Image (cartoon, rainbow, N blue to C red):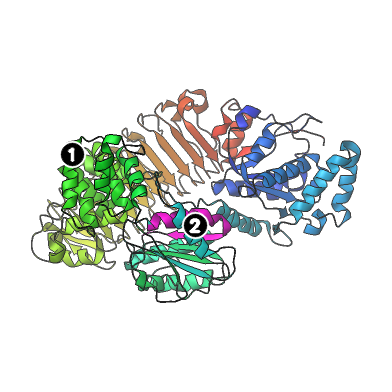
Amino acid sequence: MDMGNGSEAGTSAGEQSAIDYDIFLSFRGPDTRQGFTDCLYHQMLEANIRVFLDEEELHVGEKIADELPVAIQKSKIYIPIFSKGYASSAWCLRELAHMVDCKKSKPSEKEIVPIFYDVKPRDVKLKSQRYVSALEEHEEKFGRQTRQKWEDALKSVAQIKGWELKKQGHWKFIQLVLQEIVMKLKTKDKYVTEHLVGMDDPVEAVLKLLDVDSGGLRFVLIHGMGGIGKTTLAKMLFNKLNSLFDQCCFLGNVRESSTSSGITNLQKQLLSDTSGLRFQDQINDVDDGIKVILQRLSNKKVLLVLDDVDDEEQLQKLAINHIMFGLGSRVIMTSRNKSIIKSNKTLEYEVKPLDDVRSLELFSRHAFSRNPPPDDYVNLSRQIISRTGGLPLALEVIGSLVYRQNKASWYDLLDNLREIPHEKVQDKLKISYNALNHEQQQIFLDIACLFVDEDKTIALYMWKDCEFRPDYSIQVLVCTSLIKITDHNKFWMHDQLRDLGRKIVRGDMRLIDPRKQSRLWDLEMANNIIGTKERKKHIEAICLWEPTRVYTSKEFSRLPNMRFLMLAGGNFNGDFENQFSELRYMTCTRVSREFLAINFHPSNLVVLKLSYSSITEEWAGWSQFKEVQLGGLVQLVELEVWKSDLLEGFAGLSSLKRLKLLTLINCPNLTAIQGLGSLDSLEKLDIWKCPKIRSLDDLSDLKKLKTLMIHYCEELQAVEGLDELETLTILTFHGCRSLKSFSNLFNSKVLDKCLLHISGCPDLEAGLFFGRFSTYKKQKVGGKRRKRKRGV
């Protein structure tokens, strides 16, 4: 981009070239820099988009710097902003030509999306004199060959459908651009496990059924028994095809989310993934969701995957049977039950078990970390796989179970498998569960019933306070393939294993009595059980959902050993003295502003989460947590408050001496966090969208703080004491427009081992790049700018 005569010093090529970017902006500074481009740039930063905005100093007449081609090559989307003077800048034309070359060399990885700012596409196609005259002048200086290259680049990009500003206002136009860019950049690929065997043929077979190159609308049902690989196949297809669709969505665990509240969450995900917008406040029930889905998705070309559907009603609640999808749309469903779809227009594919050769390969990869198995184990391995029925999940779990075990253990396993009929999949998987010790079994059951897709770290707090050794137990569960930890540090479990855990909790399936379960995760069942009069010592965890219900102290007095409570709506009433002594984990959603309980003292609580609540600083619940405000929760390790519109301040935090994680998200009226500087055990502080916070306590005494993330605190002006935090490893400030200084942070050694990310903080960024901090490693800062001075 051409900056005219800017004189600011820039950074070195070596510092810039190591970074990947989402967007490369190419523009002529004098035309658009001060208004449109600057606004677009900062809006992208606030959307957490990594932008390369070129403005580094370069001497007059010098060739394009090495770092510029690297930045272009390492960017995903190129946005040339065509203005009246764009073609007069040789720098802009050089950039454009290089973008076109990169797009040609990697057509599936790069994309050019032009903005026609104050010119029309016909001007860029050289059908008017506006750009032709500029090219004639360039030919005199750079020669005919260079002119032709630039001319070809302009014509090529002008053919691409982009955005035309026309008579729209800048702000509205930028929001439209931003929405589409977010959709293009959204990470769509789904996690697929390693050591896949025998998937190539199924993928090719379903691709033929989908026939994405043809028009029309196609539905494909992938069916087969649990654990056969339906979800893995659907993920691989989604990853392979999503780049061909502007709008795509993968809805997982539809069966698990078949309760009323779960379906509305799936509706919101479907709309969010296909539009880039949030629908949290627009959908209150299933009917609302159906109406919005019909409005938004009708006549749209989409790729939609619905995983683990087991009832046609689920499809009706997602409006799948009623949407008039656009031509070219593809809908993939997976199910254990092929009869859920009655339409003869739906194509079917049955996933078959692995044959003996592929079964042996998959088993060997988990049992020996190699293929084929050692010679003296080949026969024994074949006997074991003959009892798995070619089921990938069973091969993985059983193979992991015998990893590094002696032959005696192998023969014991084989004897157990021989006693189990072929069709009893879960009984075969239960062999691995039986091999766990008591603590490992309890953690496995907790995950299956309560913590699938939940953060691992927070669950660890609860288990450790119950005197478990969760780190080792989780390691065992991962090594035996009973669970996995995702890249986002969340628990993942195959639905067969999740169902196995819940079956174990329920006990004998022929004699289901929820009153005898240790964990009640089914909301309707739990609401019924809580009102029964008998004492329920065996219940350790319960999930309650009934928005208008008032739960009494008498009801909870019958649950003396409860350590986990999830309350979605409702209220407490009565005297709770000497109750909740075992409670460690409590999450409450939409808590009533009027707190009716007295002596509400969960003194051993370790994790507290409050969300979507109308609580204030004077909320009676705070004072019920013993003494003043939050001060009585002396055992609390994690506190999260999310979407509390009326909350203006905290008090009493200073006595939470064990608190390690404090998260405050979307509290628009929060102005103060009193006692924050006294939390000397705090390891992570995460504050999002609290725009009225102007200052924080001096943080210099938080000697254990490792992660500090502050986003969209628009009135926050300074953060003191960071230069004393030698344990800090992650420091992020995003969208804090008023933030001006970090005190002496950049003169300290803190940043030597700290990953710093700053974006959307204009005053701070200016100081960082052009002031005394200019020697710091700029690759740690989110939005990138380069200054250059040139005459061409």
Q: Residue 157 or 243: which is nearer the viewer?
A: 243
The first of marks 2 and 1 along the sequence is 2
Residue 72 rendering spot, x and y as whole percentages = 66, 40
The residue that disc 2 covers is: 204
The kind of secondary structure element at disc 2 is: helix
- Quarter of the figure that contains the N terminus: top right
Q: Magenta segment range? A: 230-253
- Tell me where residue 333 appears, x and y as whole percent: 42, 65
Residue 591 in magenta stretch: no
Q: Nearer the viewer, residue 703 or 287?
A: 287
Please give left or right for residue 74 compared with residue 791 in the image.
left
Q: Image check: 588 left or right of 283?
A: left
Give me the C-alpha separation between circle 2 and circle 1: 39 Å
User: Where 518 sits versus 548, above or below?
Assistant: above
Residue identifier under label 1 = 409
Q: Position of residue 645 (x, y in %)?
A: 41, 56
Image point (53%, 52%), residue name: 186
Q: Is residue 544 visible in this depiction of the protein?
A: yes
Rendering coords of residue 509 (x, y %): 16, 63
Locate the C terminus by quadrant: top right
Magenta run includes residue 232? yes
Q: Which mark, by number, is residue 767?
A: none
